[in-house]
Image: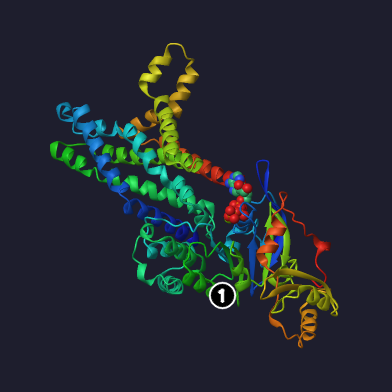
Amino acid sequence: MNSFFNAVKAVAKRELNAYFNSAVAYVFIVIFLLLSGFFTFYVSNWFEAGQADLRSFFQWHPWIYIILVPAIAMRLWAEEKRLGTLEIVLTLPLKPSEVILGKFIAAWLFIGLALGLTFPMVLSVVYLGQPDLGAIASGYLGSFLMAGAFLGIGTATSAMTSNQVVSFILAVVTCLFFILAGYPPTINIISGWAPLWLIRTLENIGFISHFSSVSRGVIDLRDMLYFLSFMILGLYCNSLLLDWQRQR
Amino acid sequence: MIRVDELTKTFGSKTAVDKVSFTVKRGEVLGFLGPNGAGKSTTMRMITGFLRPTSGSISIDGLLLAEKPVEVRRRLGYLPENAPVYPDMTVEGFLAFCAEARGYRGKSKKLKIGAAIEQCFLAPVVHQRIGTLSKGYRQRVCFAQSILHDPPYLVMDEPTDGLDPNQKHEVREMIRRMSRDKAILLSTHILDEVDAVCQRALIIANGRLIADDTPEGLRRRSSSYGTITLVLGNAVTDRLKKRFEALEEVKEVQVVSQTEAEVILRLIPARREPASAARILSQLEAEQDLLSFAVDRGRLDEIFRSLTGGSNGTGRFTENDQPAGS
Ligand SMILES: Nc1ncnc2c1ncn2[C@@H]1O[C@H](COP(=O)(O)OP(=O)(O)OP(=O)(O)O)[C@@H](O)[C@H]1O
Ligand SMILES: [Mg+2]
């Protein structure tokens, strides 16, 4: 157990260093903050809405993540393949699961850091009124878990190719599918003709319905499990893809 | 001991490695030769567990790679082809990662990194980003990674590729030094290197093993092995030729070249072995016109070409077509 933890830590540490050693980290954080500020203040008119909560802030997160999480995930495997360093990583005395988990955790922590840097938002709602802090905490938790689910998709697509751009596009398209699946406008369009079971299924497999309740402060175990199973599924696909490539 | 048994790898319909079997023992450096695309790197990638064999097995110290991959890799050091490294990391950071991934921490980690830096002459660049290093230095960084944990088994894919002559020499010295207690498998295109460091050499072509022998044994297969070249200061070729043909144990005399001043003859002994050449030379002691002589030790590049030159990879030499005496 201890050696498992140390191995995962070694991999995660290297990945985190890789983010901060290149400009990617800083660009990502700045863009994340700018986009969340822009959507919240300008698109949602947060000040005029006059509500002391962060719903209009969290509401945009799926749309920010759809671009930024694939951008963070794309290099995880594709870059190692392109450089040939995968040959070093996979011949170290590490289990594939340790490497996969280490990479995932590094990227997830990194997104978590960017998310954490939005805390001035919290300070301003506290300053402006009496917000429901529980709902805000729940929103952050939900957002973090959702980022993990996006990342599950991104690591899997990164393992498919040695081309980061291809990985990025595949991840964006896949994430878009899961956002649109449960997106109210989509549901409205199909509700006229689609059978009820299809509508329910789409709502259930989509990100939005699960995220919106968490971001309102309703922590439902099923939503948590939904995001967790997404991550596990992504990591599992990731290991299958790696394995398949070594088998070939 | 590394034991490779009937190892086969196919990529689609292409067979890159075809039923290759060999062993490498501690204290031995095994050279792995073969033309481009012969399957050397693919074989090494399977031994180190990067690629899975289509069939066949690999074991180290009796542990099967397929059953105990982590255990086996712990005992292995691997220098992949083209020395891949992370360009954004510093030399020290990269080696620290490798040490941590191998379970070293604290003081033992520092010691291991320090030793690797010293052995690979990386001290001047420890804090430099690897991406800004020259090719030779990058090669050394990757080399350092492979010996960091002082593994009993080393697999190196073209370890001296891209190094300057001094560094080539250093690396060969290091390999020779390490070979005392390690088993080393190295691939190379430099045939002199095989003579310099390897006790044994494998030649592989089109995925098939076509020779497993000592460098001396390989050179012995060369058509010129054991022939005697004589330079004589007498231009009357015919008479000389007759006289030498009459010597004991000489099968044939060929005129290599002749000018006004000198004649170069090649004596082909009936038996290709050093003792036979010595006996022929002893009969020439009284030869007044003899300016110089040389006994050919055979040439690896000739053997390499003749073994791997054919379009199907099997050259004109086969097991039962070796020159006598080998
Ligand atoms: N991933 C792969 N997919 C398909 N074919 C491959 C793959 N890797 C290697 N091959 C093929 O397998 C054969 C052996 O390649 P390998 O790299 O082992 O040769 P090599 O002996 O190392 O050559 P070189 O001296 O050029 O390094 C080649 O024909 C190569 O094209
Ligand atoms: Mg090769």
- Secondary structure at numbered mark 1: helix
Q: Which residue is nearer to you in this view: B239 or A79?
A: B239
Residue found at the far bottom of this picture: B286
Residue at the disc numbered 1: B178
Ligand 2 within 8 Å of the CB at mark 1: no
Q: How has the structure been colored for display? A: rainbow
Residue at the location (49% across, 59% down)?
B83
> Nearest the camera: B56 or A212?
B56
Q: In this picture, is B273 found above or below B138?
A: below
Residue B88 sits above or below residue B95 on the image: above
Return the residue nearer the eye: A229 or A77: A77
The percent position of residue B313, horizontal first and vertical second, equals 71, 52
Left or right: B243 as drawn, with respect to B193:
right
Seen from the viewer's position, the closer of residues B263 and B59 is B263
Q: Split into 4 quadrants, where in the image is the C terminus of chain A?
A: top right
Task: Indicate the quadrant where residue B179 lies.
Answer: bottom right
Identify the residue shown where x is 15% and y is 36%. Answer: A129
**Total number of numbered labels?**
1
| Residue drawn at the location 44% of the way across and 31% of the way down | A174
On screen, residue A175 versus residue B18, left or right, reads left
Residue at 22%, 44% (x, y): give it. A119
- Looking at the image, can residue B50 be seen? no
Residue B88 screen position, x and y as percent:
37, 55
Counting from the top left corner in percent of width and height, residue B323 is at 80, 68
